[in-house]
Image: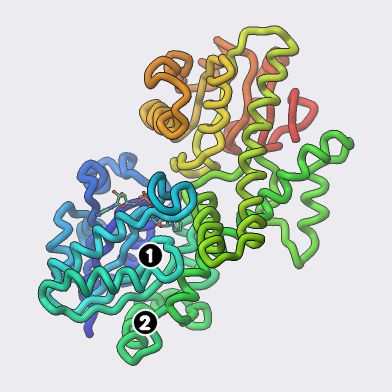
Amino acid sequence: MKVKNICCIGAGFVGGPTMAVIAEKCPDIKITLVDKNKDKIKLWNDNDYKKIPVNEPGLISILKKVRNKNLFFSEDIDSAIVESQIIFLAVNTPTKHEGEGAGFAADLKFIDACTKNIAKVATNEKIIVEKSTLPVRTAERIKEIINNNNKHGVKFEVISNPEFLAEGTAIKDLYKSDRVLIGGDQTPSGKRAVTELVNIYKRWIPLKKILKVNVWSAELSKLASNAFLAQPISSINSLSSLSKVTDADIDEIAKAVGMDKRIGKHFLKVSPGFGGSCFQKDILNLVYLLRFYGLNEEANYWYGVIRINDNQRKRVSSIINQYFTDKKINKKVGLLGWSFKKNTNDTRESSSIYVAYNLLNQGFEVLIYDPLVDSKKIIEDLKEHNTNKNLFDSEGFLKSVHVMNTIDSITKSTKVLAIMTEWDEFKNIQKLSEEIKIFDFRNILEKSKTIFSF
Ligand SMILES: NC(=O)c1ccc[n+]([C@@H]2O[C@H](COP(=O)([O-])OP(=O)(O)OC[C@H]3O[C@@H](n4cnc5c(N)ncnc54)[C@H](O)[C@@H]3O)[C@@H](O)[C@H]2O)c1
């Protein structure tokens, strides 16, 4: 098979940066990114690069080189499928809200829909690559859907190539991946499909970093990686209360623990809890799988990582509430940061959403500022969270939410601020007048300048 065309379904935080890098490294291959969200495709094609839907350092300069040369963004999903030899599935796989496994299992409806469509429209041999994060054994499900819908009797191979990039450093991660994992069937045609993908990646990733494994190991490795990455965050957060009541210093503890080479310093920074689209949903999915196989003790162990995260968010909200209750002052607070971490515009599962919602529930007026997230997105997030929790009437609570364009405009209304995201620009707020009281839930300021830090 000569790979001349690649298609990627799902032009989001993973599909966009990943295909941009592949296009840059493989100028002889035409890559088409498609998405059912037509507005998103329009933004990817916008002449003003500031409007592209994914904010990642380094992405714009790659797009300037490859967009409309060998990287195309298109609404025409079927044509892109027909002309491609390799099709990446990079659609979202959120936690299921209803049906079997609700609250834990990954919702595979978008994967199912794409697969069905590929089987219907494909007229020649295809390699389908699972790029989305999926529960182990999904390749089996994909093959079954294909067999039931294979209109033109086409030959398909399904391989797994999970993505390990982190938002905010996606381009750097894609250029210099710690490893690229490619899992396929251990049959001659499965091995050939894996080799086709290795041939793409080896153009810039050293061969020793490309791991060829069986398809099930590849699928399960991704859930395992996210569970192992989230665990130290919950571990350090779980000790932040104890550290406070005993006058220990959580940053000193993190440093001491992290200097042990067997543990490492990464992810030992105290915070209002982890967010992002992956850790929570992937650990919940792992818990679901463990329970499915009757491994309840193991499921409870990993569920603990999630529970500590929820607990940290509740704790942050009650620290703020307690301050206002003790001081008997108007419940009006400024929340600084809405994205789940700095250098990304992604807000999925951000702790800011949970904390803002808890505060609204306790009668607060909340003023919010984030350097990259606009008011439309913030309101959307709160409404969606409300739908899931169903506490407020749909519009009423939004009257107490004010999204501001600067920190200054917040301090005109309230003198109490809470740092929720570790944006660099928030480090300057310690220069604000002493009148301003700051909760530092990221431990980024000098402690003496705050009314609370962990
Ligand atoms: N965001 C991350 O940091 C990250 C990292 C590694 C892996 N992942 C995984 O990668 C996958 C994608 O994540 P993401 O953050 O890019 O999601 P995303 O929501 O940013 O993008 C997914 C896109 O898929 C599109 N889509 C859904 N169904 C479709 C269909 N039937 N046809 C065409 N387009 C469709 C959506 O419109 C959306 O634009 C998930 O499984 C996620 O767990 C994410």
Q: Is residue 43 above or below residue 88?
A: above
Identity, as a three-letter code, of the amino acid under mark 1:
Lys
Q: Which of the 4 image quarters holds residue 55?
A: top left
Q: Nearer the viewer, residue 235 or 29?
A: 235
In the rendered image, is residue 28 in sight?
Answer: no
Residue 317, percent from left and from top: 64, 27
Q: Residue at x 55, y 60 (%)?
A: 291
> Quadrant where the N terminus lies?
bottom left
Residue 417, percent from left and from top: 62, 21
* Furthest-right residue in this view: 246
In the rendered image, is residue 195 in sight?
Answer: yes
Q: What number of labels is visible?
A: 2
Residue 45, percent from left and from top: 22, 47
Q: Is residue 55 above or below residue 129?
A: above
Q: Residue at x 75, y 35 (%)?
A: 454
| Residue denoted by label 2 | 194
Q: Which of the 4 image quarters holds residue 311?
A: top right
| Residue denoted by label 1 | 131
Provide the secondary structure element on which disc 1 rests: loop
Q: Is residue 298 above or below residue 127?
A: above
- Left or right, 38 with reference to 449: left
- Label 1 crowd bin: few (<14), some (14–19), many (20+), radius 10 Å: many
Q: Residue at x 82, y 48 (%)?
A: 253
- Label 1 CB less than 8 angstroms from ligand 1: yes
- Left or right, 301 with reference to 292: right
Q: Nearer the viewer, residue 338 or 412?
A: 338
- Left or right, 171 with reference to 300: left
Q: Are marks 1 and 2 in contact (CB under 8 Å)?
A: no
Q: Nearer the viewer, residue 436 or 97?
A: 97
Residue 372, percent from left and from top: 44, 35
Q: Residue at x 42, y 55 (%)?
A: 106
